[in-house]
Image: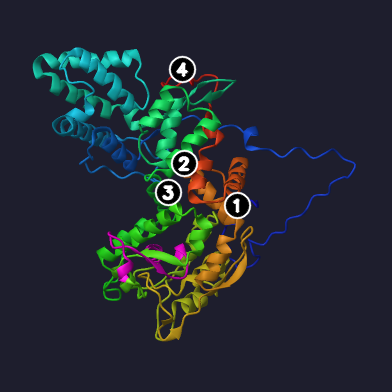
């Protein structure tokens, strides 16, 4: 694939086009040496060993599964890299968060003892032996691995100090708080134990957590714990079999929906600023319905074996009667399910859903720039640079008889200082001009018929003209750039690290996803077979991780 990211640099002078390039084919001597064998993912170095904190959502899901309660503390927000809030580099704990985790642990521990005593306790006798059993069993679930003897000793020492004065239940409460404050609970380890050279094989327990958080966004279930304890979760066949089970669980579809919602940042719709005078019906309820619509569309595709290309081309969407009325779409409300949702015929594909169109519009109208930039960066994985510092930016002013398209054609595309970059964004963004800033469909603007024709230019493999969002969707659905970008984003989300789109492993994963049918569920199962799920790279000075070695 062309190394395209380095080519993006605005051209203030307007002279030579910085995006024109001509690849040459090197001369090969027919009598020369045989070409080297193509490198495979297994020929490259594994990913680095990793420790990463649970994201806010992972923390919430995990404590719900562990103690049956949701946290009440309002945590400071997580950072994000490329839109994803589970990147290991940003998931650290600063002073304020440390105090919040302490308060949350104490609150959850008190609630667990008061409301879920019989669920968290494995025994009924209020004895030290029962406390040891609790520490051993609850600790294994909290740490997502067996406790070492010294760890059990430490927790029992705390028990011995508290129980004489405060009694058995109060002692258990403080033990729970201790587990929930522990870095072994708050962080996921992907460290493994040394094998050949500097390769570290992840333990069955670490792999169990990788799978559960990848597929469900929460801690392993009993089956994963059982397999890890038996040493039956470290071969590629064992992992693939378990991945199929996880993918068929009801928790998998919402997790996939959340990934796509972060990749295509539809959560912005809840807070995006809109002019209430121009868009009076764009209410909080409609915003939420739009976000739910997007999520339900992805989940509908997931359970029907569809892939990202199918979603880009989708001629249907899940709506409530209220949302259909807002969009002006004809729908039979009698077909709505018990929750008030129904499948409605509508053109345009996933990219034209209200949550995305409204999020990428301005406060008063559509925005070809934002929408085109979104396609470039999120679907084609081509980073656009900011405007040069020496360019004077004047926002186009609407006048009577002007349209959004005409303003940008006459300002950004006609301006030699701007055209170099905006040619790449605006021409794509024009394809969404049928959608106003509030996500509703329109055929005219200022009395003029909408022109939604456009063109993708200077992309590695996706160039082409289109007329309207459906033809744009068809171009993107058939694009190898989109396939590779989609997998690259999945790899980043699954591993919590930034991935080179041109890496051998990323390209190999694209081929495997296609071989497996390209469905959303199949993509996730394919990712679970990654070598980096099982092996990590360290150096000669590093020691084994805290979890037991593979097979022990």
Crowd tier of the residue under label 4, counting other residues whose Cα lies within 10 Å: few below 14, some 14–19, many 20 or above: few
Residue 473 visible? The answer is yes
Q: Tag 4, which secondary structure? A: loop
Q: Position of residue 199 (x, y in %)?
A: 56, 24
C-alpha span from label 4 to label 1: 47 Å
Question: In percent of the image, x 45 and y 56: which residue is there?
Answer: 301
Crowd tier of the residue under label 3, counting other residues whose Cα lies within 10 Å: few below 14, some 14–19, many 20 or above: many
Nearest the eye: 376 or 154:
154
Q: Tag 1, which secondary structure? A: helix
C-alpha span from label 4 to label 2: 26 Å
Tell me which label, 4 or 3, sits earlier in the chain: 3
Q: Tag 2, which secondary structure? A: helix
Which dot, 4 or 1, sits closer to the camera? 4
Figure check: 273 above or below 545: below
Q: Position of residue 456 (x, y in %)?
A: 58, 66
Check disc 1 and report the residue beneath it. 6
Any magenta on residue 330? no
Figure check: 287 above or below 545: below
Circle on res. 494: 2
Quarter-of-image position of residue 211: top left
| Residue sticking out furthest to the left | 165
Circle on res. 552: 4
C-alpha span from label 3 to label 1: 31 Å
Nearest the eye: 409 or 263:
263
The magenta-colored residue range is 333-360
Q: Position of residue 410 (x, y in %)?
A: 51, 78
Which dot, 3 or 2, sits closer to the camera? 3
Check disc 3 and report the residue beneath it. 256
Residue 47 visible? The answer is no
């Amino acid at each position: 694939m062309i190394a395209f990211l380095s080519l993006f640099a605005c051209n203030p002078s307007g002279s030579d086009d910085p995006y024109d390039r001509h690849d040459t084919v090197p001369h090969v001597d027919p009598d020369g040496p045989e070409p080297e064998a193509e490198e495979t993912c297994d020929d490259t170095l594994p990913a680095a060993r990793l420790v990463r904190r649970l994201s806010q959502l992972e923390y919430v899901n995990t404590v719900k599964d562990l103690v049956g309660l949701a946290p009440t503390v309002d945590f400071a927000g997580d950072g994000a890299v490329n839109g994803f809030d589970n990147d290991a580099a940003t998931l650290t704990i600063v002073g304020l968060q440390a105090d919040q985790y302490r308060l949350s642990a104490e609150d959850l521990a008190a609630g667990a003892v008061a409301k879920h005593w019989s669920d968290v306790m494995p025994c009924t006798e209020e004895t030290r032996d029962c406390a040891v059993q609790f520490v051993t069993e609850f600790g294994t679930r909290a740490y997502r691995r067996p406790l070492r003897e010294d760890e059990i000793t430490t927790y029992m020492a705390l028990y011995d100090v508290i129980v004489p004065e405060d009694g058995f239940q109060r002692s258990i409460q403080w033990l729970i708080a201790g587990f929930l404050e522990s870095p072994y609970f708050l962080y996921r380890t992907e460290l493994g134990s040394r094998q050949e050279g500097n390769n570290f094989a992840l333990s069955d327990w670490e792999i169990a957590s990788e799978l559960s958080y990848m597929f469900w966004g929460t801690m392993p279930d009993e089956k994963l714990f059982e397999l890890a304890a038996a040493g039956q979760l470290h071969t590629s066949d064992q992992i693939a079999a378990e991945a199929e089970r996880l993918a068929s669980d009801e928790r998998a579809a919402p997790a996939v929906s959340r990934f796509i919602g972060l990749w295509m940042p539809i959560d912005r719709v809840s807070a995006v600023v809109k002019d209430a005078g121009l868009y009076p019906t764009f209410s909080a309820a409609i915003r939420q319905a739009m976000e739910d619509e997007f999520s339900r569309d992805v989940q509908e595709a997931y359970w029907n074996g569809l892939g990202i290309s199918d979603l880009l081309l989708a001629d249907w969407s899940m709506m409530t009667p209220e949302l259909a009325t807002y969009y002006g779409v004809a729908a039979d409300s009698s077909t709505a399910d018990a929750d008030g949702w129904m499948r409605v015929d509508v053109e345009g594909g996933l990219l034209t859903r209200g949550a995305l169109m409204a999020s990428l519009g301005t406060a008063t109208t559509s925005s070809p720039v934002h929408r085109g930039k979104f396609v470039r960066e999120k679907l084609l994985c081509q980073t656009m640079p900011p405007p040069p510092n020496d360019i004077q930016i004047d926002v186009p002013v609407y006048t009577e008889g002007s349209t959004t398209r005409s303003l940008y054609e006459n300002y950004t595309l006609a301006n030699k200082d701007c055209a170099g970059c905006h040619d790449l964004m605006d021409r794509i963004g024009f394809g969404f001009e049928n959608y106003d800033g509030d996500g509703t469909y329109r055929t005219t603007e200022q009395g003029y018929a909408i022109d939604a024709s456009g063109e993708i230019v200077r992309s590695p493999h996706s160039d082409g003209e289109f007329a309207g969002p459906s033809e744009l969707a068809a171009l993107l659905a058939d694009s190898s750039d989109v396939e590779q970008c989609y997998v690259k984003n999945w790899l980043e989300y699954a591993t919590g690290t930034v991935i080179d789109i041109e890496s051998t492993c990323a390209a190999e994963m694209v081929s495997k996803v296609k071989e497996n049918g390209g469905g959303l569920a199949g993509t996730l199962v394919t990712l679970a077979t990654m070598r980096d799920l099982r092996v990590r790279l360290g150096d000669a000075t590093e020691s084994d991780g805290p979890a037991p070695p593979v097979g022990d």
